[in-house]
Image: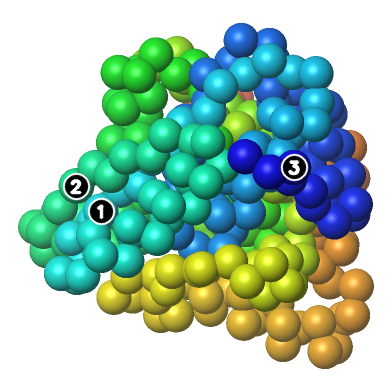
Amino acid sequence: MTNLNLPQIIFSKIVRAVVEFELIDDDDKILIGVSGGKDSLLLTYALACLKQRTQKNFSLAALTIDPRFNDDFSEKISRVKKFCNELGIAHEVHVVDIAALIREQKNKSPCYTCAYFRRAAVNRRAVELGANKVAYAHHLDDAVETFFMSLLSSGQLTTFQPKTFLDRTSVTVIRPLVYLRESEITDFAAERGLDVMKSPCPFDGLTNRQRIKNLIVELEKIFPDLFSHLAAAMRKNSVGELWDAPKTREQMRTAYFALKNFS
């Protein structure tokens, strides 16, 4: 394998995430979730680069889930296998008929169903391979969009964490790209000529996440600092003056009857 290198700004942001959130330790066995898109290809390359350029002693493997959205997936994914093999990373494909599961669970969001069964398959294979960590390619735009979408759709201030321990499997999920903007990944993929595979998802571009992405772009025309403010708001130290949690009827019972009997 030849010497690997990343633009300094990208390498620095990934190293910052790894250090700040303690994502990688010696003797880690990391399974990378690789879809073939630009994000997961950069993640795979970046982890191979970190392995080559840092003192951390860890191993890598890669897994792609075939969701059975179309018939030519196996032909396309061969390019991903070649990419991984050139980086010295063993790659395998597992079929999970997510298309059928979506049809069966008509009352649930297709995105929810896809994400749930895809994650379950990756986590299960990680356990089988003896991997203690799973790496996903979520970036800063994903985190901000999740945060904003949660606020608008559920009234909660929440997003995914850069590092999450899963009790049921004892696997830790890590997201080393959380400081990278999507535009940086897009530029890197274009400059390096990465063989990016188009998403096979039949709902690509039609999801609530895409609507939130578009909404942020539109709102930035009015509020240019919107994205950076949303990113800052995700931090726990950003919380200012908020109302107390609503009280239950039981908690208010005494005060209620005192008020009711007041004359």
For the point 81% across and 82% down, the residue is 220
For the point 83% across and 46% down, the residue is 11
Q: Which residue is mark 1?
A: 66
Q: Amino acid at mark 2?
A: Val
Q: Is residue 141 visible?
A: yes
Q: Position of residue 41 (x, y in %)?
A: 56, 55
Disc 2 from disc 1: Cα separation: 5 Å
Upstream in sequence: badge 2 or badge 1: 1
Give the quarter of the image for residue 146. bottom right
Element type at marker 1? Answer: strand
Q: Is residue 168 left or right of residue 19?
A: left
For the point 80% across and 31% down, the residue is 53
Q: Which residue is mark 2?
A: 95
Residue at the front extreme of this rendering: 2
Q: Amino acid at mark 1?
A: Asp
User: CB of mark 2 within 8 Å of CB of mark 1?
Assistant: yes
Give the quarter of the image for residue 203. bottom left
Name the disc covering residue 3, or none.
Answer: 3
Looking at the rendering, in which quadrant would you find the C terminus? top right
Q: Position of residue 241 (x, y in %)?
A: 88, 45
Upstream in sequence: badge 3 or badge 2: 3
Foreground residue, 64 or 183? 64
Disc 3 from disc 1: Cα separation: 31 Å
For the point 33% across and 57% down, the residue is 78
